[in-house]
Image (spheres, grey):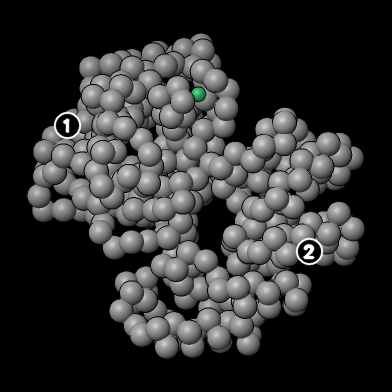
Amino acid sequence: MKSYSKNDLYDISELEIKRIWDYFYNNIESILKYKDLYNNMMSVFGKCPDYIQECAIENNFFSVPDIYYKASEDIGKKLSEIILCKNDYDIYDVLECLAMQGGKYAVSTFIELNKNNELKKNLSEYHFENIIHMYANIGGWDFDDFGNKIVLIYDNCVSIRKSEYKNNVLNFFNVIDNICPRCGNNMVNIVSVDCNNDMLKFLNLEGIITVSCCIDCVCYYEYYSKYNVDGTNKPIFDKELIDNAVTNSNDEGMINFLQDIRGYSDNNFFTLDSISSSVFYSSYDWEENSIGGFAHWVDDANYTKCPECGKTMKYLMQVNNDLILSGSLYICICSDCCITSVSYQQT
Ligand SMILES: [Zn+2]
Ligand SMILES: [Zn+2]
């Protein structure tokens, strides 16, 4: 099987694309063997064709959950039945598949499972309370106490590329005057993004959204800020962050690091990639910078809770950068309260 990069896949013929899907259809398990090619196909096309989804469930193939992304309600029903009938299949795998399917049977099944304390205990002794929510999060959604599905991802993804020219849409890494209450160093505007840009209309957000954090302490704590549409924002510090203040604020490494960041935005420009891409565009690749779609979570998905309304926040953006060593920043948003969060996961 010839391997194609994401970029190659935009250029090859429809016939060749069909040939690849057909190969997976005839050899469903081979998706594991050709995982890179499969991931690239999903990155570009966003969904397996129906006939592959049907083939997967007929063959009880549950090792690659995203095959089932947006599969038919018929398939959702079958996956639910497998879970509720407690067949011999690995329930973890099937739950991930059902989360990816994300239809009405998925939501009702997750809600039912969440009421079953015995089952939750069996699933994990560590995440007893949240375990069912964590599985739903794998599919990019959550549910509330009233049985409503809450979608946690935007259904489009735009990737970000370096550019030779400055533009007003994206601006990364600016040291600001606000001081981190934990370490006493200057905070950093991770990104300002102009959501009025045509390519970002799918976000349904207004104005320029600026997201900031302490580039050092974000390794340990989540940072929140309240944004205004004019691009200004105000940090909201978690009590835990303030309570855990450290005293060695004149850490030389950190001062040098901030020095490196100063001037970064004057010399490094970014632009939105005009190639349309799918929700999975960045989800297999932590080195991608992108807005919308699924994140590539290094660890478990971490959709933060809004400090104002308490709702689970929506994933907005993944930032990887020459400045962030061996890790990834994830930005979530509550557009009701105009609040963003930044968290970090290390590779
Ligand atoms: Zn700090
Ligand atoms: Zn909120």
Q: Is mark 2 on a helix, strand or loop?
A: helix
Residue in the foreground of this view, choosing between 276 and 184:
276
Residue 14 position in % (x across, y down)? 40, 83
Label 2 environment density (alpha carbons within 10 Å; few <14, some 14–19, many ≥20) = some
List the residue tagged with mark 1: 262
- SS at circle 1: loop
| Residue at point 90%, 58% (across, down) | 85
Residue 80: x, y in percent? 79, 57
**Label 1 C-beta lies within 8 Å of the nearest ligand 1 atom:** no
Q: Which residue is drawn at 46% across and 46% down?
A: 154
Amino acid under label 1? Arg
Q: Is residue 144 left or right of residue 212?
A: right
Q: How far apart are marks 1 and 2 (CA)?
A: 55 Å
Earlier-in-chain disc, 1 versus 2: 2
Q: Can residue 26 be seen in this view?
A: yes
Residue 339 appears left or right of 195: right
Residue at 64% from the left image edge and 80% from the top image edge: 28
Instruction: Indicate whether 223 appears above or below 60.
Output: above
Tell me: 253 left or right of 45. left
Which sits in the foreground, 135 or 240?
135
Q: How many labels does the image show?
A: 2
Estimate the x, y position of residue 46 in percent, counting from the top left: 48, 64
Q: In this view, does 6 lie above or below 114?
A: below
**Is residue 249 at all visible to an observer of this figure?**
no
Q: What residue type is labelled 2?
A: Lys
x and y, in percent, of residue 183 in the image: 37, 18
Residue 195 placement, left or right of 331: left
